[in-house]
Amino acid sequence: MDNVQAGVLTDQYITVPKGMGDKVKPNVTHNDFLIAPIKKGQQIGTVKMVADGKEVAQFPLVALQDVPEAGLFGRLWDSALLMWQKKK
């Protein structure tokens, strides 16, 4: 599997001054290389809510599904691709 669905586990609420609601934007960072197995709920990054260049809240970005480890040949292939990516 080449990708995993990610998000936050529950609704998140933040309070900002009146008139700033439209200025709040998410800034998502995630780990570049994720190695299976990945468990549902495992943190794989961070969601920062930013308004006017200031961080107003931060939440964990988590896997929304399990990602099992690949079989032997899949792991060999993935290892080769990972080594190639690191050499760039």
Image: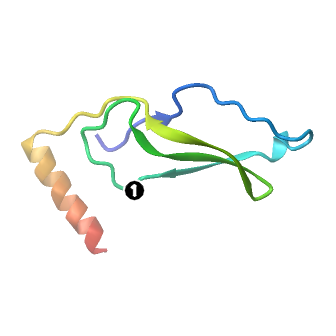
In percent of width and height, residue 84 lies at 23, 67
Residue 9 shown left or right of residue 14 in the figure: left
Judging from the image, the colouring scheme is rainbow
Residue 30 shown left or right of residue 51 in the figure: left
In percent of width and height, residue 70 lies at 17, 39
What residue occupies the far bottom of the structure in this picture? Answer: 88
Q: Residue at x 33, y 49 (%)?
A: 34
Residue sitting nearer the eye, 78 or 28: 28
Q: Residue at x 14, y 45 (%)?
A: 74
Question: In the displayed structure, would residue 66 be above or below residue 69?
Answer: above
Residue sitting nearer the eye, 20 or 83: 20
Residue 52 shown left or right of residue 35 in the figure: right
Mark 1 falls on what kind of element? Answer: loop
What residue occupies the far top of the structure in this picture? Answer: 10
Q: Split into 4 quadrants, where in the image is the N terminus? A: top left
What residue occupies the far right of the structure in this picture? Answer: 19
> Given the image, on which type of amino acid does mark 1 rest?
Asp
Q: Name the residue under label 1.
A: 32
Q: Split into 4 quadrants, where in the image is the C terminus? A: bottom left
Residue sitting nearer the eye, 10 or 6: 10
Mark 1 Cα-neighbour bin, 10 Å: few <14, some 14–19, many ≥20:
few
In percent of width and height, residue 80 lies at 16, 60
Residue 81 shown left or right of residue 28 in the figure: left
Residue sitting nearer the eye, 26 or 14: 14
